[in-house]
Amino acid sequence: MTTLAARTIEALRAEHDALASLADSLTPEQIEGPSGASEWTVAQVFSHLGSGAEIGLANLKAELGQAEKPGPDFNQSVWDRWNALSPQEQVSDWRGSDEAYVSALESLTPEQHDNERLNPGFLPEPVSVAGFAGLRLNEVANHTWDVRVAVDPAAGLLDVSTGVVAEHLGGELGFMLGWIAKADALTEPVVVEVAGTPYRIVVGDKAQFTTEALDATATFTGPLEAALRLLTGRLGPRYTADAVQVTGNVTLDELRTVFPGF
């Protein structure tokens, strides 16, 4: 079996290729129209992904000793430059920026996968190569959905990314739910089993996504990708299939308040 780092980077390549193909088919109206991210147009999602790739690549090179560490104003300068682009430029320039970042991750050796510890620039401690790439994949998988759903309201996360993102959130990157969840939105603890998977969504003093065999108090019935979209605020009523249900001591609407998204 390939390593988690390798599977994560393979998923990033698949996400890039799929989004590049979709970008070629977008009309000017779609580019400037709304995305699945409530406050962003499709072009702004591309801008976010493109600027994020540029910043991520700069941090990767610095962590590998290939370049100096970016200065305190670097991120803002990148965002300002991308924000100044036209919508069409934001889409077209994303391609080269993301390609450079994915290619750099693909160039890492198996030994580096096993031994390097990397800091993306915003964590108190470095993480594994798998975790470093996983942070990017979690962002990319959700934001590429933001683009796809603008064209197809029934879109889900890509299959190639779903299992990998779940593995990350249930492991090294579980701390991310602490950033985005509002655990105090519920009046009692819940353990929501995701039917047909080993995963549970736990909301108590904090929120967790875990494979620990805890006694369930509720059940999420639906595909794993939908459960992951719930965790990032992307399972609103408009984007929820009729077959997706939550039964037990919490409702789907209540869980939506716990996970407002980003």
Image (cartoon, rainbow, N blue to C red):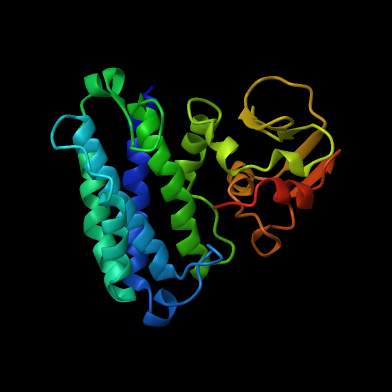
Please report the residue visible at 62 percent of the width from the left and 27 percent of the height from the top: 210
Q: Answer with the quarter of the image where residue 36 lies.
A: bottom right
Please report the residue visible at 49 percent of the width from the left and 57 percent of the height from the top: 145
**7 sits left or right of 38 in the view:** left
**173 sits left or right of 91 in the view:** right
Q: Nearer the viewer, residue 187 or 163?
A: 187
Residue 106 in view: no
Q: How many marks?
A: 0
| Relative height, residue 12 to residue 202 (above, below) | below
Please report the residue visible at 29 percent of the width from the left and 44 percent of the height from the top: 56
**185 sits left or right of 143 in the view:** right
| Relative height, residue 82 to residue 55 (above, below) | below
| Relative height, residue 181 to residue 207 (above, below) | below
Q: Nearer the viewer, residue 115 or 194?
A: 115
**Outermost residue toward the bottom in this view:** 29
Provide residue 217's location: percent of width, then percent of height: 82, 31
Q: Answer with the quarter of the image where residue 116 lies.
A: top left
Q: Answer with the quarter of the image where residue 247 lies.
A: top right
**Outermost residue toward the right in this view:** 249
Q: Nearer the viewer, residue 190 or 241?
A: 190
**Outermost residue toward the front in this view:** 72
Provide residue 212's location: percent of width, then percent of height: 66, 20
Provide residue 162's location: percent of width, then percent of height: 51, 41
Provide residue 183's location: percent of width, then percent of height: 71, 38
Please report the residue visible at 41 percent of the width from the left and 29 percent of the height from the top: 124
